[in-house]
Image (spheres, helix red, strand yellow):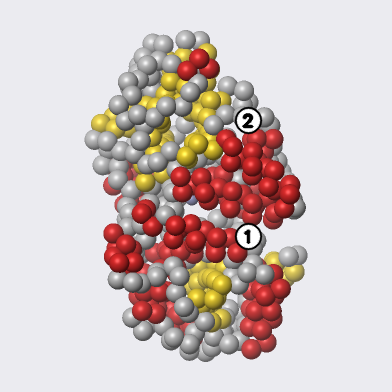
Amino acid sequence: MPTQSQNSNIDITLKHHGGKLGVTGSCHELRIHRNGTKHGILIDCGLFQGKDAKDKNGNDKKLDIEFPISHLKALILTHTHIDHIGRLPWLLAKGFKQPIYCTPATAELVPLMLDDGLKLQLGLNKGQRERVLELIRKQIKPIPYNQWHRIPLSSRSSSLRSSSSLKTSPSYLLLRFQPAGHILGSAYVEIKLPNNEIVVFSGDLGPSNTPLLPDPISPKRADLLVIESTYGNKIHDSVETRAKRLQQIIERSLQDGGAIIIPAFSVGRTQELLFDIEHLIHHNKIDSKIPIILDSPLANKVTKQYRRFKKLWSKEAKTKLNNQRHPLNFEQCITIESHKEHIQVVNRLKSTAEPCIIVAASGMCAGGRVMNYLEALLPDKRTDIILAGYQAHGTLGRDLQCQKSRVWIDNQSVEVNAQIHTMSGYSAHADQADLIKFVEGIEEGRKEIVVVHGEREAREVLEKILDATSC
Ligand SMILES: [Zn+2]
């Protein structure tokens, strides 16, 4: 970089405060220099996880916001995964008072996701957490999909107005969210510059043909595209057949008894899994006596929001609802709320090895209730673990995926005798073909493409295919 706009009064640069060279800590800044003044728009403010959370000396990376914020005009959130919103409390602590734009569903999910993070990472009590969340709620401005909204660049035009026919002028930018198909409320972001050029930030894009959410549709124009590359070097197993593959693994796993543990992100993965499990139960492919245990208070709350925002579901999912099915709320699913109840279930399964399917957070086995299940049940060879999503370097999930015979949990070495299965069809991310399709669908612009949010090989492979720049 820098990326220079053609307009003589304005030039733009991209700054990356995380999520450029790794897949966590997403935080990009579109910096606009206009008539000699600097303005910034921040896109996401995520937490570093796994190996990204260490500095070059191996120390934990500070959560402090180590970049200037006084010139920032807004924060835009693409979706509520913690690696995209987790540093938000620290941004506010540094004095960020500007609007936080996101979709209405994201606005509902942000406090849920952060409440969990503030409790787990900082150990804040309920009152302290509520004070932080109240501040965030006040700054959040929900904007529905497919509507242009103004982001003023000068304080004189600071009122927020919405209109689909706004004429651009040099004093503000226009912002629009479009469905990204990644998780509920997720969006890619179009930012129209005063010179009418459009910058697009993909956020995290979803794969094609998932049953619960509609596929992302490419923007018409993107002069500068900042695109994720989590799976820039991979093609997923077919989404259409994933329920069948899940059924096969479950059938095999249940032959010797024992628990099936599916670590899952509370938002997105859990709901996709429940959706498919309900499908298998409906078609008598899973024994009606096998308990499906959803052990994640956060996932329970998020699932309620998925049910609330049914209008954002795909056609296929809506059809099920019209046929009196309840894909995210079925009888065989037992939800565990209290910690006491959770410990009872863990102990019971450890002593009985009775067959059941447990869906619990976190998705990369980097905390959450799934850890107690793993510590108790990994040494038992009757246990099966289904890794249904991306496992970042440095996480326990990645260690399991690499078939390590011993892992560390809570400073204890735990023997792994369980069977480990990986299912990529459950990724909430676009694969290489989906990413290329997204780019090729852009009809106008495409002057510059910047590839972010990927490990080195994934990024470089996609860059080469797209012939993109690496800034
Ligand atoms: Zn995400």
**Residue name at image x 69 percent, y 43 percent:** 131
Q: Is mark 2 within 8 Å of ligand 1?
A: no
Query: Which one is nearer the viewer's eye here, 103 or 277?
Result: 103
**Residue name at image x 59 percent, y 48 percent:** 111
Q: Is residue 451 visible?
A: no
Where is residue 98 shown, x and y percent of the image? 57, 29
Q: Which residue is mark 1?
A: 366
Where is residue 409 shown, x and y percent of the image? 70, 67
The part of the image, by quadrant, that contains residue 300 is: bottom right
At mark 1, the secondary structure is: loop
Q: Which residue is mark 2?
A: 96
Query: Which one is nearer the viewer's eye here, 289 or 447?
Result: 289
**Residue name at image x 51 percent, y 45 percent:** 107
**Residue name at image x 49 percent, y 47 percent:** 106
Tell me if 56 is positioned left or right of 29 in this view.
right
Where is residue 137 shown, x and y percent of the image? 58, 41
- Image: 231 above or below 303: above
Answer with mark 2 or mark 1, whichever residue precedes in sequence: 2
User: How far is the residue under mark 2 from the one under mark 1?
Assistant: 29 Å
Disc 2 packing (10 Å; few <14; some 14–19; many ≥20): many
At mark 2, the secondary structure is: loop
Disc 1 packing (10 Å; few <14; some 14–19; many ≥20): many
Where is residue 391 shown, x and y percent of the image? 53, 59
